């Protein structure tokens, strides 16, 4: 945690994996990477650079299923959004939960809400959907119409 | 004096069921028992089992998952029991009524004797509501 | 053959306000494993947010949790103002920080009371909640409501704190400080509380980093993270204060951190009130034309830790995606580390020490017999068990 991060370091290490970088301000950057590279990127951020995993946000857009992994470097107040875009029909990506426990629950939740498959996740039990909505239904997908809207 | 009015004359024992709520109402209910309002001096207690209760307080917008449990608790309650729906969520579902897990406000699931609206209702409002209910029952 | 018992805490129990189900698998008196079910509190807030305008979302996120009722609008406002590059006035910054810190004071007092109840010290519960009432009266005076204050809007705050109200606020804070002195003395010097809470529910520094835990839970294990210092917002960089940490990581350390933080909060509020007096001519809100396309990351330090809101805008009046992460989402998961290997009585206390806010997380504990599947103890029995343990220790000290 007392290592000083150099974003340039990150950009050098993962040059071939980065697709796009948007710098909102010195403390907020959105880096779009290839979805296959998520494991080495997360490993570098967590183990080498001392980032903390805040949470992951999934979105369903016209481009497909997108996930922003939010990592925070507390010593500098910096948030890096690692952004991936997944396939529209079969969204899947490697799970980060074998590396640290912080992503365990949110990956299960994203699976229940969006239907994204997290490969090699240690525990695929239901988190919030039991009794609340049926199997195979993904409430946050944009084509989903809940009971209220059907009426 | 009828049997029911005799039962509810004094020292009501209360069971609290919190549905899918934000806890504002739950905390205001607990506030009624703390030294400022101190309902315990009237013998009003919060009990751990529905079978000991005279009054069932329900708050929160009820989730599909909470619905069966609310029904089960109501069935286990010894009758006569007074049911009070507390807060905007308990009365009508509040802002959560449009959610995809909403299973209807409390009166769609069990019969309700009194509604105490507010977000959250102040402890004074809760006490006034209960007193009005007991006087009318 | 060892018999494992499964003890239920919840889902509906009088002192645990929210419904949640934790299954503690016990072998005799020791907790061996924990499974938990949630979903009782799930209300679909993130989806509801997409159908509301930005101003309406404030009323929605306030009601995610009644105790952290300011922190969610705070983080949401930070996210949208970052998205749209809006800079708020100094007066608005001071007012926002005052409300945030007043909430921290009332929330920590609430926790002290609940911790007292879990320990079996019901007098502590009654006292702490009694001294909380003047703080709620202050909220009513400033905003009109004891909870859910509706003070925030994009670009500033909705109501001002007039100069005439400042002496009343300072007086109440002075009283709260005196009472905090008394509570600190009662908790920190009591040998029975030391015996019940020291060495119980320990989380190491590595556990905190692995689970990404935040707030007093992390600071009690020596991990000095606090959004107000790391990623400053509102009036926090304009006033002097320090981050409180402890090293032991047990329940006692968590109580210590929370009690000492109350002093810092009172100091911050007093400094902000002086700042308000200087900014007499300031406006409380700035004009906001539109919210452009883009994303915003906003965070705030709630009494329980870092609240994080992620907002994606498509240029319309409503958020296209609004992700909410409450601190209890990461803190509750640490139960696996802090409760396993403890006795049942201590596990109840470890659960309370993290100050779980289930409605923020949306997700109560039960113990069953692992072999027969029978319910052994319900929630109030668990609390009684914890209170009994305190009495046993009291006898040892001949109190």
Image (spheres, coloured by chain):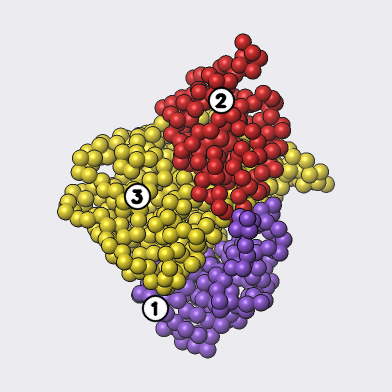
Chain colours: A purple, B red, C yellow
Label 3: element kind: loop
Which percent across, then down, holds residue C76?
41, 59
Q: Is residue B97 left or right of residue C365?
A: left
Tell which tag, 3 or 2, sits nearer the viewer: 3
Which percent across, then down, holds residue C249?
50, 52
User: Looking at the image, which is closer to me, C81 or C363?
Assistant: C81
> Residue shown at 65%/36% (left/top)?
B110
> Residue shown at 42%/71% (left/top)?
C315
- The residue carrying pointer 3 sits among few (fewer than 14), some (14 to 19) or many (20 or more) residues within 10 Å by Cα, namely many
Residue, disc 3 = C151
User: Looking at the image, which is closer to me, C331 or C292?
Assistant: C292
Residue, disc 2 = B45
Res A73 quadrant in image: bottom left
Q: Say if labels 3 and 1 share a chain.
A: no
In the displayed structure, B87 sits above or below A50; it is above
Label 2: element kind: strand
Residue, disc 1 = A23
């Amino acid at each position: 945690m007392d290592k000083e991060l150099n974003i340039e370091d990150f950009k050098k290490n993962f040059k071939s994996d980065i697709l796009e970088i948007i710098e909102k301000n010195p403390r907020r950057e959105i880096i779009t990477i290839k979805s296959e590279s998520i494991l080495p990127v997360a490993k570098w951020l967590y183990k080498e650079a001392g980032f903390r995993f805040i949470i992951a946000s999934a979105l369903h857009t016209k481009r497909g299923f997108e996930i922003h992994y939010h990592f925070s470097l507390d010593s500098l107040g910096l948030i890096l959004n690692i952004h991936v875009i997944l396939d529209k029909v079969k969204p899947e990506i490697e799970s980060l939960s074998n590396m640290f426990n912080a992503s365990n629950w949110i990956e299960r939740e994203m699976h229940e809400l969006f239907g994204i498959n997290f490969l090699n996740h240690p525990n695929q039990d239901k988190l919030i959907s039991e009794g609340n909505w049926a199997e195979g239904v993904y409430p946050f997908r944009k084509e989903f119409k809940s009971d209220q809207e059907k009426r | 004096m009828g049997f029911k009015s005799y039962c509810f004359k004094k020292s009501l024992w209360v069971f609290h069921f919190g549905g899918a709520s934000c806890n504002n109402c739950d905390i205001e209910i607990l506030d009624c028992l703390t030294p400022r309002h101190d309902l315990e001096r009237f013998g009003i207690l919060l009990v751990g089992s529905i079978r000991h209760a005279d009054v069932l307080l329900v708050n929160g917008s009820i989730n599909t998952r909470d619905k069966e449990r609310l029904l089960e608790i109501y069935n286990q309650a010894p009758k006569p029991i007074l049911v009070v729906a507390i807060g905007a969520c308990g009365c009508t579902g509040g802002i959560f009524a449009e959610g995809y897990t909403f299973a209807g406000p409390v009166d769609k699931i069990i019969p309700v004797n009194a509604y105490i609206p507010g977000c959250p209702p102040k402890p004074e409002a809760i006490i006034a509501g209960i007193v009005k209910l007991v006087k009318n029952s | 053959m060892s018999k494992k018992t499964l003890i239920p805490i919840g889902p509906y129990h009088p002192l645990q306000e929210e419904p949640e189900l934790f299954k503690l698998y016990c072998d005799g008196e020791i907790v061996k494993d924990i499974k938990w079910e949630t979903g009782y509190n799930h209300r679909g807030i993130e989806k509801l947010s997409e159908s509301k305008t930005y101003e309406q979302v404030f009323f929605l996120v306030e009601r995610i949790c009644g105790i952290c009722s300011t922190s969610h609008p705070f983080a949401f406002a930070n996210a949208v103002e970052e998205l749209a590059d809006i800079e708020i006035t100094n007066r608005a910054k001071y007012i926002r920080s005052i409300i945030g810190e007043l909430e921290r004071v009332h929330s920590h007092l609430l926790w002290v009371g609940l911790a007292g109840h879990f320990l079996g010290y019901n007098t502590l519960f009654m006292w702490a909640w009694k001294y909380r009432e003047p703080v709620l009266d202050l909220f009513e005076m400033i905003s009109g409501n004891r909870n859910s204050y509706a003070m925030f809007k994009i670009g500033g705050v909705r109501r001002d704190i007039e100069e005439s109200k400042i002496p009343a606020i300072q007086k109440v804070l002075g009283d709260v400080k005196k009472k905090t002195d008394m509570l600190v003395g009662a908790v920190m010097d009591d040998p029975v509380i030391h015996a019940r809470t020291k060495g119980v529910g320990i989380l190491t520094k590595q556990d905190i980093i692995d689970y990404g835990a935040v707030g007093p839970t992390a600071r009690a294990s020596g991990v000095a993270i606090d959004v107000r210092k790391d990623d400053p917002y509102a009036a926090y960089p304009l006033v002097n204060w320090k981050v409180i940490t402890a090293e032991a990581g047990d329940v006692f350390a968590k109580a210590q951190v929370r009690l000492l933080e109350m002093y810092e909060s009172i100091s911050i509020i007093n400094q902000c009130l002086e700042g308000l007096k200087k900014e007499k001519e300031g406006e409380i809100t700035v004009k906001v034309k539109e919210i452009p396309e883009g994303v915003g990351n906003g965070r705030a330090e709630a009494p329980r830790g870092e609240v994080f809101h992620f907002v994606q805008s498509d240029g319309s009046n409503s958020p296209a995606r609004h992700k909410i992460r409450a601190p209890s989402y990461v803190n509750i998961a640490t139960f696996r580390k802090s409760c396993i290997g403890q006795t049942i009585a201590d596990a109840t206390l470890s659960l309370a020490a993290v100050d779980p806010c289930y409605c923020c997380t949306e997700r109560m504990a039960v113990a069953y017999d692992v072999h027969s599947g029978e319910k052994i103890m319900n929630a109030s029995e668990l609390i009684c068990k914890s209170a009994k343990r305190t009495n046993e220790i009291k006898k040892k000290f001949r109190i």
